[in-house]
Amino acid sequence: MWRWVIEISLALSVGANIYFMTRHGDAAPPPPPAQPAPPAPVAAPPPPAPVAPVPAAPVASVTATTAPACPPVVHGDCSAVEKQLAETEAKLEEHLPPNERYKHAGRSLDVETRARAVLDPIFTPLSKNPHAYDVECHGAVCKLDVVDKAIPLDAWMQAVQSHGGFAGWAFSGRDAYATMGTPTETAQSVLMGAIGNALNPDAGLHECVGDQKPAGTLTLDIALDPATRRLNVSASGSLANEHVGSCVRTHVQTLLDAIKAPSDVASFDQPIPLLR
């Protein structure tokens, strides 16, 4: 019995579905959905309130003034700065090459006189021309121009550099620049140059020493006697009292007697190692 009830229920359900579908197909389509109402217009924002201009700050007037000759320093005094600047420039000048210092200084006739006293004995053996060279000095720096072109370049260059009257030689072609010392320094150098020229080379010394160098040491000490202005020689070393020492000392004393010490030389004492 329940079986038939279930079958009937199914049949009724199917029939109902068919009917519903049939009725739905014959019915009029539903009306289209209503369109939404347009949005209400939005009011434009009010314009911004005007901003009151800010008045510009007043600019103080500037009066043109003349710059001071020297920047303000302690107590407004420029002398200390100027002194320091001058000292710095002087120190820098010392490190410039001779040709640059020559350009920066004025002519010095007294220095030229001392320079010629040094150069004349150097060039006399090198040339028969009485005007073998020209020299012009600016400050302590002298410019040497060798006029006699017959003098070999290496000959006069070696001669001036071996003499102690100048220092710091700088060569440019046949021109040369060097610095002269003080009168005392120049006189000492002149005396040393005269002694060196007398002793080297010298045939008398060769005769004393001989061809074979003796074993031992010999040092000559040349000193100036301030009272007599005479150059005296003494000897020390293991050969001082030997024949060679006595011979050398006698011969050198003869050479020194022909040398006149410059008046600017107050004292002189120079050891010269001869044999070591």
Image (cartoon, rainbow, N blue to C red):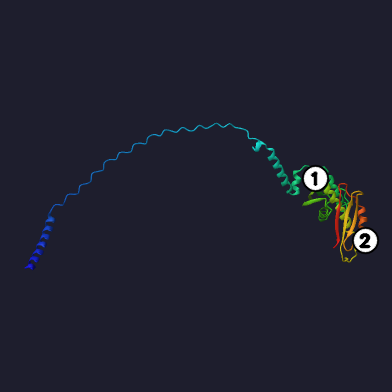
- In this picture, is 140 found above or below 239? above
In the rendered view of the protein, which quadrant contains the C terminus? bottom right
Mark 1, residues whose alpha carbon is within 10 Å: few (<14), some, or many (≥20)? Answer: many
Give x and y (percent) for residue 188: 84, 50
Give x and y (percent) for residue 180: 80, 48
Mark 2, residues whose alpha carbon is within 10 Å: few (<14), some, or many (≥20)? Answer: some
Q: Is residue 20 visible?
A: yes
In the rendered view of the protein, which quadrant contains the N terminus? bottom left
Give x and y (percent) for residue 167: 79, 51
The structure residue drawn at horizontal position 69% and vertical position 39%, both measured from the top left corner, is 80
Q: Which residue is mark 2?
A: 246
Name the N-terminal-most of marks 2 and 1. 1
Q: Say which of marks 2 and 1 sits in front.
A: 2
Contact between labelled residues 1 and 2, with CB atoms less than 8 Å apart: no
Type of amino acid at the residue the image marks with label 2: Ser
The structure residue drawn at horizontal position 80% and vertical position 45%, both measured from the top left corner, is 137
Q: Is residue 132 visible?
A: no
Question: Most extreme residue toward the left, as rendered?
Answer: 1
Tell me the CA gap for discs 2 and 1.
45 Å
Front residue of 134/238: it is: 238
The structure residue drawn at horizontal position 65% and vertical position 36%, both measured from the top left corner, is 75
Give x and y (percent) for residue 142: 80, 47
Looking at the rendered structure, the secondary structure element under dot 2 is: helix
Q: How many marks?
A: 2
Type of amino acid at the residue the image marks with label 1: Cys
Q: Which residue is mark 1?
A: 137
